[in-house]
Image (cartoon, helix red, strand yellow):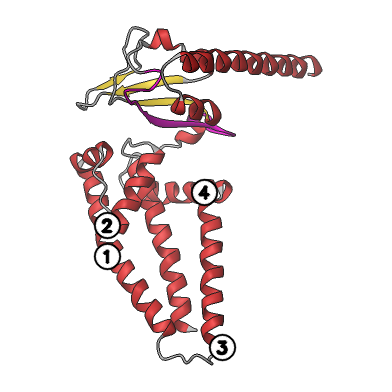
Amino acid sequence: MAPVLSLIIILAVSILITRIASNAIMHTGLSKQSAKFQARSAFTGVGFTTREAERVTEHPLRRKIVMLLMLLGNAGIVSAMATLILTFVNKGENDFRWYWDLLIIAGAVAVLWLLSTSKLFDRWLSQQIDKALNKYTDLNVRDYTSLLKLSGDYQITELGVEEDDWIEGKALEQCALRKEGINVLAIIRADGTYIGAPHGETRIESGDNMIIYGQEDNIRNLDVRKKGRKGAAEHRKATTKQKKKEKSEEEKDLERKEKN
């Protein structure tokens, strides 16, 4: 039983370490999705070569966090494998504890997976991590979730632009993304040039990374939209849908004011 408990503790601590690291990387300016991806890549030693990875290595604080993750990841993976081997070694075919240990491990992994994908638990854990980072580190910890009102399905994320994307080659005013409920906060060019608060004449190019704010469904629809008539039709449909949504919200707000 001791090896099984040890394995569960190692898995739980590993998840916690990557969560703390991703929060710390986020506070250096990387988006939530990129921070999570880079933290998990560093911890598991996968080492994906992406533009975000290059930005991580160029930033001194991010580089320190990633180096620590690599060290802890190597130790954690080796410990987990050793503990897993010890759990099942020297157990005969008729030893029912083998099945019991396997069931406990499977149950623990399922619980950890549910917790790691729970939005409520993620929000609570992020708050606790931010408090600890604010208290024990020099990181500039700010509650961007509250600041940007990232409640419900609103989010801030990075969107990569490819050659066949509907927005590629267009100026922001041509895209009229605000009519879809999407705001472009910044654009990072392929050569690393950062354009903060881009204006309507700013052209979107292949290889750009756009930092955008909006509702999850609207962002997802934009992400999969391709060039051509179908893309233009999807844009008109998204604009109409957003107008109806805004009108409904205005009506609800009016009703609330009348009641008060």
Query: Circles 2 and 1: CB distance less than 8 Å?
Result: yes
Cα–Cα span, label 1 and label 3: 32 Å
Query: Circles 2 and 4: CB distance less than 8 Å?
Result: no
Q: Which segment is the magenta one?
A: 147-167
Give the labeled residue for mark 2: 45
Cα–Cα span, label 2 and label 3: 35 Å
Amino acid of disc 2: Gly
Magenta residues, dominant SS class: loop
Q: Badge 3, how many Cα within 10 Å: few under 14, some, many 20+?
A: few
SS at mark 4 in the image: helix
Amino acid of disc 4: Asp
Amino acid of disc 1: Asn
> What residue sits 33% from the left and 26% below the top?
162
The relative height of residue 65 versus residue 182 in the rendered view (above or below) is below
Q: Nearer the viewer, residue 29 or 77?
A: 77
> What residue sits 73% from the left and 19% below the top?
252
Residue at the right extreme of this rendering: 259
Hey, which quadrant is residue 164 in on the image? top left
Where is residue 117? Give x, y as percent. Answer: 52, 51
Where is residue 50? Give x, y as percent. Answer: 26, 40
Label ID, residue 96:
3
Which badge, 3 or 4, comes first in the chain's sequence?
Answer: 3
Which badge, 1 or 4, comes first in the chain's sequence?
Answer: 1
The relative height of residue 81 versus residue 94 in the rendered view (above or below) is above
**Residue 52 sits inside the magenta stretch:** no
